[in-house]
Image: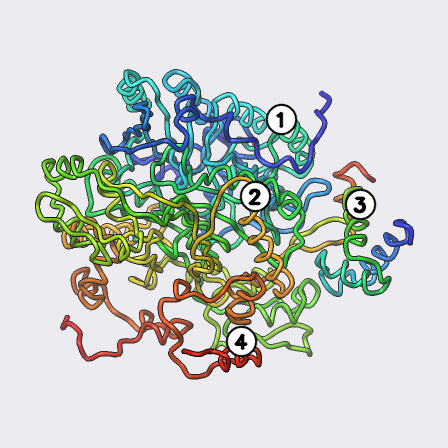
């Protein structure tokens, strides 16, 4: 079959053709919205028009077969209109109120997970992991699945003090907002890379490799036409591997996962915050990483019991203090928790006023 | 039909209530040998706790330098169908809205040439097609582009811009995020498809400070909606919240970061000049409170993930800019920002890192933005201060401080 | 200067640097503009024309994009060999 003629530099299609008529009509004229239940909300326009949204979880990896099924549902109940959220949820957009319950019933029958709206856990932002990434130290999709099976009711039903945004990054490149999430998993290397001198010499630009190291741990090795790594300075970030693949950093027994907490991106009440280290390391335990899942559940439970209404994880911790966070969660405080990199000055305590643990 | 590879580890991840990516991969594997070997290789990773992908090389279709991420198996003999398993990024429509007709068309093409696996969506916002071979790249591009779909960005380029759904369905949006992103994406087609920059550059547009696209954390240039007028109060609606059980004193007044809200049990008051527009009260009492007056955006610059020397959140650079079609002022500002970065950056240096190296002054001067207290949390703490000769002309001629 | 002549210079420089330094698009434009005294936009146009017909190609490696002389594999895939 002959191929159609290619076009270049056309950019994305204009969004307007994908908007439901009620959205087109009331564009920029919305008045308010209400969360009706954990998976449903209504937006009301100045005109009085309404659009209902039913939110459904996805594993982010979707087979086309599933997308066809989603399309069938959107045709049946939503006149063929749907959207996705920035956290990989599917949103069915309904103009006819009478179709909400039948849609939800069919979603339930077909084993879709409805929820994620309001003060709950929404879908988890995550990266490719072993499924499709060259630098992964874990499998992001597997961690998300194991974690969300455990936290399921916080998506579909149970309320928390506020939204809790979860994220999983399969290495420190963090192709997701892990660094500003309420609770996040970030996979780490913990071992000095192994240098294949022959290949480094042939494949890589030595000055680029030397320049890639944030801790100046890499020096040229002119004798081997390669580089050497100072074991005392290397923090295993893997940036040298990114610029020069023959510097191998992955290691089955020493790649693992850290838990970071207390980040946020919105400006509500307090400024956006980075996530901070809660637990420095877990070994990879596929397929279900039970220790990590239990640790996340523990942090979430302690937050749910102790935070005030509307406080995000980071706001709660800042109010009670990090020493209190470690006490309440029973997490051991270690050398790894004290920053010895770029944020050291900002993070050491400079006051004798603190709480006893 | 049974699959080629046994997957005992992955089968464990089909149990439990949360939707399973393994189930998705198996669905695709039934139709596609590529997806089948992809599943087999993943099972191996679960057994050995190691990844087996290499990347680099192939980056696109003829003439483009991005949109395709070359991916190759480290184990091509064991898993020959994924010897090549490239990713394709399709530039998503603003707000991730689709019709079923469009989605089906995308999927049907993908089923013909690829693994049938997708990400809806990737971290930057693109519609991601996971896994195809090299021979299929040109045919896929012809099929998609002829139907109005272009590739997204990858490599050292302007990455695919993305936005929250803005005014299409949200009462809080202060400007038309979807239209701005559509316009900027069209404006920067060359920079998006042909990687001529020192490194990646990301633009994200959020309609308000709730920032549903994480622009402040994940984009070199964040356009965050804001306003200049008062917060309008509908006291009847305030009463309904109170009657409905909201503890306005604790939940609204007590949580206002600037202590500008008061409530006497009857009437809610806001000391508007003291409000920092954080969005808390508006988000919690959306029927009662709404912004008014002049609308626009705050431009924040520099955020990125930890590589190389630590994460950055974006810094306020332009406290307020009007964002109205045809967006001339915004486009010119962004052009100056990108030009300064492109002229000065070393390879693989993001704009936030460059500002740290060069200082804020050269950047602000280059883009024509004056220093303003809104740009800092506090002024400098150290007494090591740069002065230029021209600063003294100003200092000497001033009557006051 | 004829565009063909600029292209020859670009190709000669790319050949000379092959295996020594990964050239960014900007490196080539800067070098050829300096050597010839031509406007950068003129050089860029010639470079882009070469990329459009597979005389040169964009590549990715070491965490960054570059411009290279295409491999036979690439040319074969694009139906040019």
Which is in the foreground here, disc 1 or disc 4? 1
How far apart are labels 4 and 2 at the CA level?
38 Å
How far apart are labels 1 and 2 at the CA level?
21 Å
Question: Is circle 1 on the same chain as circle 3?
Answer: no
Question: How crowded is the residue under tag 1: few (<14 C-alpha within 10 Å), some, or many (20+)?
Answer: some
Instruction: Look at the image and tell me whether residue A106 can be seen.
Output: yes
Question: How crowded is the residue under tag 3: few (<14 C-alpha within 10 Å), some, or many (20+)?
Answer: some
Residue denoted by label 2: B184
Chain of the residue displaying label 1: B
Q: Residue at x 21, y 35 (%)?
A: A157
How far apart are labels 4 and 3 at the CA level?
41 Å
How far apart are labels 2 and 3 at the CA level?
25 Å
Q: Residue at x 42, y 72 (%)?
A: A342
Name the side, left or right, on which A75 lies relative to B79: left
Which is in the foreground here, disc 2 or disc 3? 2
Chain of the residue displaying label 2: B
Q: Secondary structure at mark 3?
A: helix
């Amino acid at each position: 079959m002959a191929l159609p003629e290619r076009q270049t530099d056309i950019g994305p299609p204009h969004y307007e053709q994908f908007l439901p008529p009620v959205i087109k009509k009331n564009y920029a004229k919305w008045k308010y919205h209400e969360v009706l239940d954990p998976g449903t909300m209504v937006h009301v326009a100045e005109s009085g028009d309404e659009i209902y949204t039913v939110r459904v979880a996805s594993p982010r990896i979707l087979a086309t077969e599933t997308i066809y099924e989603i399309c069938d549902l959107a045709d049946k109940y939503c006149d063929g209109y749907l959207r996705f959220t920035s956290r990989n949820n599917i949103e069915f957009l309904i103009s006819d109120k009478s179709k909400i319950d039948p849609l939800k019933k069919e979603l339930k029958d077909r084993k879709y997970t409805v929820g994620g709206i309001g003060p709950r856990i929404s879908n988890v932002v995550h990266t490719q992991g072993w499924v499709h990434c060259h630098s992964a130290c874990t499998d992001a999709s597997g961690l998300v699945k194991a974690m969300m099976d455990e936290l399921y009711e916080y998506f579909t039903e149970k309320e928390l003090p506020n939204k809790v945004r979860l994220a999983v990054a399969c290495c420190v490149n963090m192709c997701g907002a892990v660094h500003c999430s309420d609770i996040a998993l970030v996979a780490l290397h913990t071992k000095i890379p192994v240098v294949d001198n022959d290949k480094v010499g042939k494949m890589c630009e030595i000055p680029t490799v030397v320049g890639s190291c944030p801790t100046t741990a890499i020096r040229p090795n002119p004798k081997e036409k390669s580089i050497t790594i100072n074991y005392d300075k290397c923090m295993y970030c893997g940036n040298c591997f990114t610029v020069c693949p023959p510097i191998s950093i992955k290691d089955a027994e020493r790649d693992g996962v850290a838990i970071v907490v207390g980040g946020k991106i919105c400006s509500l009440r307090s400024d956006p915050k980075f996530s901070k280290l809660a637990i420095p390391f877990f070994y990879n335990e596929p397929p279900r990483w039970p220790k990590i899942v239990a640790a996340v559940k523990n942090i979430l439970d302690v937050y749910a019991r102790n935070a005030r209404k509307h406080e995000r994880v980071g706001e709660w911790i800042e109010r009670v203090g990090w020493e209190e966070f470690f006490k309440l969660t029973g997490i051991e405080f270690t050398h790894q928790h004290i920053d010895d990199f770029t944020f050291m000055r900002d993070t050491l305590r400079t006051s004798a006023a603190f709480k006893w643990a | 039909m049974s699959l080629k590879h046994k997957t005992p580890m992955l089968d464990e991840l089909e149990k439990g209530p949360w939707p399973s990516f393994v189930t998705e991969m198996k669905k695709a594997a039934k139709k596609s040998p590529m997806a089948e070997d992809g599943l087999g290789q993943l099972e191996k990773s679960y057994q050995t706790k190691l990844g087996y992908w290499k990347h680099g090389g192939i980056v696109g279709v003829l003439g483009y330098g991005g949109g395709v991420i070359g991916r190759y198996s480290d184990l091509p003999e064991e898993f020959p169908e994924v010897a090549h398993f490239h990713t394709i990024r399709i530039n998503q429509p603003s707000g991730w809205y689709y019709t079923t007709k469009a989605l089906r068309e995308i999927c049907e093409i993908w089923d013909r040439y690829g693994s049938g696996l997708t990400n809806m969506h990737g971290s930057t916002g693109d519609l991601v097609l996971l896994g195809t071979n090299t021979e299929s790249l040109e045919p896929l591009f012809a099929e998609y582009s002829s139907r109005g779909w272009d590739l997204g960005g990858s490599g050292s380029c302007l990455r695919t811009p993305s936005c929250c759904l803005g005014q299409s369905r949200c009462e809080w949006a202060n400007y038309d995020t979807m239209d701005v992103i559509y316009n900027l994406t069209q404006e920067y087609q060359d920079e998006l498809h042909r990687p001529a920059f020192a490194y990646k550059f990301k633009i994200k547009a959020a309609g308000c400070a709730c920032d549903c696209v994480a622009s402040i954390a994940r984009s070199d240039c964040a356009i965050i909606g804001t306003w200049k007028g008062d917060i309008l109060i509908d006291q009847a609606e305030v009463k309904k919240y109170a009657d409905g059980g909201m503890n306005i004193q604790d939940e609204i007044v007590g949580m206002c970061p600037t202590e500008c809200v008061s409530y006497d049990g009857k009437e809610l008051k806001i000391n508007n000049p003291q409000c920092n527009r954080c969005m808390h009260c508006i988000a919690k009492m959306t029927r009662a409170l709404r912004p008014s007056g002049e609308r626009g955006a705050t431009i924040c610059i520099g955020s990125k993930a930890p590589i190389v020397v630590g994460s950055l959140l974006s810094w306020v650079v332009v406290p307020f800019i009007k964002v109205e079609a045809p967006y001339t002022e915004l486009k010119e500002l962004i052009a100056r920002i990108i030009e300064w970065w492109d002229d000065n950056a070393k390879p693989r240096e993001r704009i936030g890192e460059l500002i740290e190296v060069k200082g804020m002054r050269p950047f602000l001067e280059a883009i024509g933005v004056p220093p303003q207290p809104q740009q800092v949390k506090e002024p400098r703490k150290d007494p090591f201060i740069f002065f230029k000769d021209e600063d003294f002309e100003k200092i000497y001629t001033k009557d006051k401080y | 200067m004829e565009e063909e002549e600029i292209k020859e210079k670009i190709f000669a420089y790319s050949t000379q640097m092959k295996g020594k330094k990964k050239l960014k698009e900007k490196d080539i434009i800067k070098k050829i503009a300096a050597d010839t005294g031509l406007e950068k936009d003129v050089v860029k146009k010639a470079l882009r024309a070469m990329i459009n017909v597979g005389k040169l190609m964009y590549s990715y490696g070491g965490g960054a994009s570059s411009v290279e002389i295409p491999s036979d594999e690439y040319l074969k895939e694009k139906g040019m060999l």
